[in-house]
Amino acid sequence: TVEEGGIGAGLTTPKYRSDIVRLFTPRRWAGSGAFEVGSNTGGITRLLGLLFRYVLAAELHHTMSWGQANRGTSTANVVHLTIDTTRPYALSGFVANRNLRAAVIDGAHDRQSVFMDTFNVLSDIPCCVSVIVFHDYCDQVVHDAIALFVRASVLRYRQAIGEDPGSFWWCAEGRPEGAAFDVVRTKDFRQTLWRLYQDFRGWKGHGELVRQFYETVWWLPSESATLTLSAPPTQSAIHHANPLQRGFDPNGVGVGVLKVVGDSIGEPRWGFAMLRAELHDPDHPGRPCADLHFDSQATSLTLQFADEERREACGWFRRGAVEPGP
């Protein structure tokens, strides 16, 4: 039974665990993998290990996953991961895995964590999670974060999991303890996810997007320099590494005025979802001298010049900047 062998541990009810078994007992799940967010003390982890070919069990606190392995409460097909699943691209290491077909999420209950746990499962693992089970769906904050994906037609309610209504003190409005959702994969799935992420971050329009980059500093390895993006009309500046001072030149070189112009969706060489900005020569504001392509979560950028003339138009080599090689 689900109460034997340590399976009954954790803050889940027997009804929740029994519903998990009924949901994933059909043989079509037996040859696939499952991803668990928030494995805690391993109650659901062990249960999933009996239902799936393998389980990737993620837990932020390593003492919990370490304790599971050393108590022998995990089956041999469970891989324990100590990872913060809310960080950008936290699950990108599993991008090539085409056999993860289900996810069980029981992480932190704050809005940011629920959203990012769900977003990363859907975005970083592009294939082939088809069902996600959430514990504590009865919690108001958890419910509201999941509802963002439902309203965007990314998730579709499938069934209640566990006590219905939930009996925990944090349960609200007669909702069930947990819930299962089908993942709705359309041709615009990834673009819809990216728009949802933008809305969640509050990036409404290009004006708001550009404000996200004011006074941010970016490392440019190919230039051995940092790029500081400033608010218009102030020019953005590059600070080159100075080996003699073991640091960066404090006198930055102006390299153009920042202007966010849109996104790069549909440009394969820059990835599926990007933000695009330009640096404009202040003396010729209608003529961009460099393009900046940011990743969809604004954690990295690629700097592109069309030619050397545009490169120099931004003053890239003026006032002490490194001269171009032959």
Image (cartoon, helix red, strand yellow):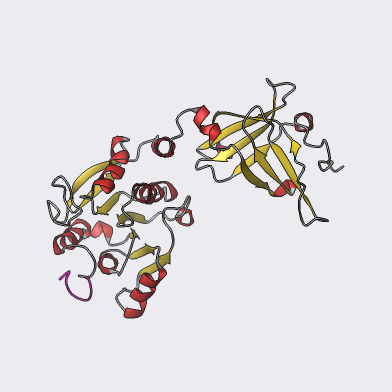
Q: Name the side, left or right, on which 189 lies relative to 300.
A: left
- Residue under the point 33% across and 54% down: 101
Question: Residue 27, percent across and down?
Answer: 23, 60
* Quadrant of the image occupied by residue 147: top left
- Residue shown at 39% from the left, 46% from the top: 119
Q: Which residues are magenta?
A: 1-7
In which quadrant of the rendered image does the N terminus lie? bottom left
* Residue 217 picture quarter: top right
How many labels sit on residues?
A: 0
Q: Is residue 232 visible?
A: yes
Residue 253: quadrant of the picture: top right
The vertical placement of 4 against 322, above or below, is below
Q: Is residue 264 visible?
A: no
- Quadrant in the picture for the C terminus: top right
Query: Is 42 one of the magenta-colored residues?
Result: no
Q: Relative to 108, does residue 251 appear above or below in the rendering?
A: above
Name the main secondary structure of what is drawn in magenta: loop
Residue 212 position within the rendered picture, expressed as x and y whole percent measured from the top left: 53, 37
Q: Nearer the viewer, residue 271 or 28?
A: 271
- Residue 299 percent across, percent down from the top left: 55, 46
Q: Nearer the viewer, residue 175 or 186?
A: 175
User: Horizontal placement of 137 versus 190: left or right?
Assistant: left
Check the image and name the residue furthest to the bottom: 71
* Residue 24 position in % (x across, y down): 22, 58
Nearer-the-camera pick, 234 or 225: 234
Seen in the picture, residue 195 relative to 5 is either above or below; the reply is above
The extreme right residue here reads 326
